[in-house]
Amino acid sequence: MNAALPIIALAFVGALGLGLWARAGHDMDMEQWSVGKRGFGTVLVFLLMAGEIYTTFTFLGGSGWAYGKGGPTYYILCYLTLIYVISYWLLPPAWKFAKQHNLFSQPDYFAARYESRPLGILVALVGLVALVPYMVLQLKGLGIIVSTASYGAIPPTLAIWIGAAGVSAYVMVSGIRGSAWTAVVKDILILAVVVFLGLYLPYHYYGGIGPMFSAIDQAKPGFLALPDRGQSATWFASTTILTALGGWMFPHIFASIYTASDARTFRRNAVFLPLYQLMLLFVFFAGFAAVLQVPGLTGPDVDLSLFKIALETFPPWFVGIVGATGVLTALVPGSMILIAGATLIAQNLYRPLAPNATDASTGRLAKIMAPVLALACVGFTLYGGETIVQLLLIGYAVVTQLFPAFFFSLWRRNPLTKAGAIAGILAGVAAVSVTVVGGYTLAKLFPGLPGPIQDLNAGVVALALNLAVAFAVSAFGNRGSKPNTASA
């Protein structure tokens, strides 16, 4: 047995232990389990939000796209920055409304704002659909990390099963409080490991970051720029906008709004969270360093680039540290996803059908549903072949369809009726479903359009259809909307 495997196992067991410690002295009722009694301060909310956003997508997907795609990778840097700008304006009024109405989940917010239980159920269903590829992303990444970092001692399928079982137990016991405290350790580790890899690898193999880019450009001309077609400037801009608008619409990220003790927390975090973006540059550097050192990776295998070059460069004990860091980048967001998904099922799908359900029975059901949801996601993980970034883009295209209804709900006089909001979401999600399931792009559907228009992200087109339908239905429906008590 090499030295990497015990280190990875220690990180996994340590995370579970930290989750148990975090729950000590707290009664795990529904409010404590799902939103931490709304008592998290600036630091914990900061780490929780960072823990949800900087995941295996950051660790493997960012480096994998740098390795496989080159220039288009930088959209990741842009959209995350815009997410934080958006949070400065939109999250404080959303938090105030949620606190006033004692809300637990994202569908609770929509149902209360529009006074529509059917809208809440629809948002819960859309949220679950979007959470599946996000959770698959974490499990897929976990399988890659553990299998590769253990030098093949643990096969990916076994790693996925162990990870799903571990995170389910972790969630059932500790809830969101355990996720927040584990995020502290995760963020310290990922910052140290990523910065080291992003600096050491270019200097070790190329003599510096500048020489590395020069070598790549000479070997693969045009690789570091946006292509003229496909992932062109049009794709870059439309994908950045789509993912920025959808950033806070994932149920587990939206639910983090409820954990704060003060609305000003979000504006303080919006100032400092963009500094976290600098970490992504080092992730990209590690991926670029692998381009010429471990050539030949294609398709989903590009996500292996960071670990492939680490295996060739470092001794097993250090590979174990890299693997342990990667495990935490999967466990923290994975636990948040299961908490949010289980809460959606219990609070927003089961409870409307069971009027006599109590808070206690709903809380018990949510904890039971966490491993059930994990099991379903394992099935999708084992039979899906998309790369990590592609999985995330699918989730974003779906969940961004909730943004118009959310954005206009913050206006003092909402221009959308509940019927308009429902119709818009259904139209947008239907459009995304057709393009994803059918594998269609604008280029395939409309070959006569100019090239830049063909390269638009199909999710943006679905969002435009969403808006058009929502406003059309609202215009012909009952426009007697009430002024909101909070505005953006």
Image (tube, helix red, strand yellow):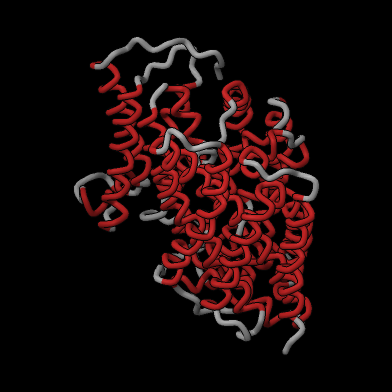
Q: Position of residue 453 (x, y in %)?
A: 31, 43
Q: Is residue 191 visible?
A: no
At a point 47% along the width and 51% down the height, the residue shown is: 131
**Which quadrant of the view contains residue 116?**
top left
Which residue extends farthest front? Answer: 356
In this view, the residue in front, 129 or 111, is 111
Name the foreground residue: 51 vs 163: 163
- Picture quadrant of residue 86: top right
Residue 196 in the image, given as x and y percentages of width and height: 77, 64
Residue at image position (33%, 42%) is: 429
Please state which of residues 193 and 90 is positioned toward the viewer in this rendering: 90
In the depicted structure, whether residue 89 falls above or below residue 7 = above
Asked if 22 appears above or below 351 in the picture, the reply is: below
Residue at position x 39%, y 44% from top?
Answer: 125
Q: Residue at x 68, y 76 (%)?
A: 310
Image x and y of residue 154, in percent: 60, 82
Q: Is residue 417 visible?
A: yes
In which image quadrant can residue 7 be found?
A: bottom right
Query: For the C terminus, which image quadrant?
Result: top right
Taking depth in this image into account, of 27 and 9 the one nearest to the observer is 27
Q: Quadrant of the N terminus?
A: bottom right
The tally of labels here is 0
Residue at the extreme bottom? 1
User: Residue 235: x percent and y percent?
Assistant: 41, 48
- Image position of 42 with respect to 369: above or below: above
